[in-house]
Image: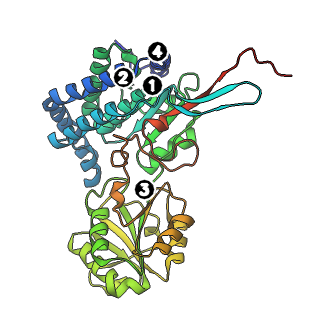
Amino acid sequence: MKDLTDIPALMAEMGRRARAAAAELAFAPSEARRRALEAAADAVWARRAEIVAANAQDLDYGREKGLSDAMMDRLMLDEARIQGIVDGLRAVAAQDDPVGATLAEWEQPNGLTIRRVRTPLGVIGVIYESRPNVTADAGALCLKAGNAVILRGGSESFHSSGLIHDCLVEGLRVAGLPEDAIQRVPTRDRAAVRELLTMTDSVDVIVPRGGKGLVGLVQQEARVPVFAHLEGIVHVYVDAAADPVKALRVVLNAKTRRTGICGAAECLLIHRDALDTVGQGLVRALLEAGVEVRGDETLQAIEGVQAATEEDWGREYLDSIIAARVVEDIDAAIAHIRRYGSGHTDCILTEDDAAAARFFERLDSAILMRNASTQFADGGEFGMGAEIGIATGKLHARGPVGAEQLTSFKYLVTGDGAVRG
């Protein structure tokens, strides 16, 4: 029985076990990792009723904590969402194995043949809030890339995450892989998070997935390298050449499909020349859909639009609220996004190829879209099976973090008695 009161000792032991498991995973057969994920998917589906019951406990806990409707939506699991977890596990299992793949190969005049090949990062710490499905996504992607992982889920999802983790361990057992390859911190004590952030001897990278408070804490306190996903301050810019039908479909979906995910639109920018042809209709459609629109002075002329304040620009609502303003042209939209955006996902709605090219060229968000809902900002939708998060930094991993992004590389150099003169 683990001593859950001695947090430093608990975490140090988990780190040691993860490092040992990672050493085995580095050369484990691809087929074994695939089998583990398929068996885990079988286990999740077989235990779906237990997982839903455990999730009901988590929902009660969330209500007691006063979580917002959007956060409660992130927390909730039903049979359809569990089917999504199962599908995600199977999709990751079916992907090509990134480990050992040759990225480049060349010969030098000095007689050396050099190959650059993918290799696991080692041990990954994943810290996340609310969403129990991240337990499956993170565990699956780390395993697929040959890494061991230490999962620290949010206190709200403690029970359902625990059962999902049990299913992942069952998969490891079936495949004959070390069960320590996927570990879960078995306590809600926040001291475990601070401990994990400083475990430089056993953890190679930290991936935080959550709100600004969590990610800010991780970036401030971590001594281990971090793949950061700060905020999803997502903009949709309606250009003068936007197609009205496409614009209506995309904007409504980008905002209302699920308001609590990081790809949800948070700010609508409307070209002045599109205000009468497209913009007013979009704003009214959002209002009719129950979205609270906080607009600039121009848009306040539309009945139902509330006055935006400076705090509304650059704000991640994760709720049925959107900021909206009229801009003079595409360059004003770009300037607004540069000032208030978070480098996550931004979209242009236009039929003008030159405008789209300018938007893509002059903005440097991790994901830029044209005429597509920002709710597609998701590793699963990108063909990665799942994701741990959307990295908004610029080093190593950027955008959806899937299995390939959880690898590094090494050089394999072969000679035939070569010596350097």
Residue 58 sits in which quadrant? top left
- Residue pictured at 27% horizontal, 19% vertical: 170
Q: CA distance from mark 2 to mark 3?
A: 32 Å
SS under mark 4: helix
Q: Which mark is residue 24?
A: 4
Q: Assess whether mark 4 and mark 3 are in contact (beta carbons under 8 angstroms).
A: no
Q: What residue sits right under mark 1 in the picture?
A: 146
Q: CA distance from mark 4 to mark 1?
A: 9 Å
Inspect the image, locate mark 1, and give the three-letter code of the amino acid beneath it.
Answer: Gly
- Residue pictured at 27% horizontal, 84% vertical: 303
Q: Is residue 278 visible?
A: yes
Closer to viewer: mark 2 or mark 3: 2
Inspect the image, locate mark 4, and give the three-letter code of the amino acid beneath it.
Answer: Glu
Looking at the image, tell me whether mark 3 or mark 1 is earlier in sequence order: 1
Residue 202 location, x and y as percent?
A: 54, 22
SS under mark 1: loop
Is residue 108 shown above or below 235?
Answer: above
Looking at the image, tell me whether mark 3 or mark 4 is earlier in sequence order: 4
Looking at the image, tell me whether mark 1 or mark 2 is earlier in sequence order: 2
Q: Is residue 47 visible?
A: no
- Residue pictured at 25% horizontal, 54% vertical: 69
Q: CA distance from mark 1 to mark 2?
A: 8 Å
Q: Assess whether mark 1 and mark 3 are in contact (beta carbons under 8 angstroms).
A: no
Q: What residue sits right under mark 3 in the picture?
A: 232
Disc 3 crowd rating (10 Å Cα; few below 14, some 14-19, many 20+) is: many
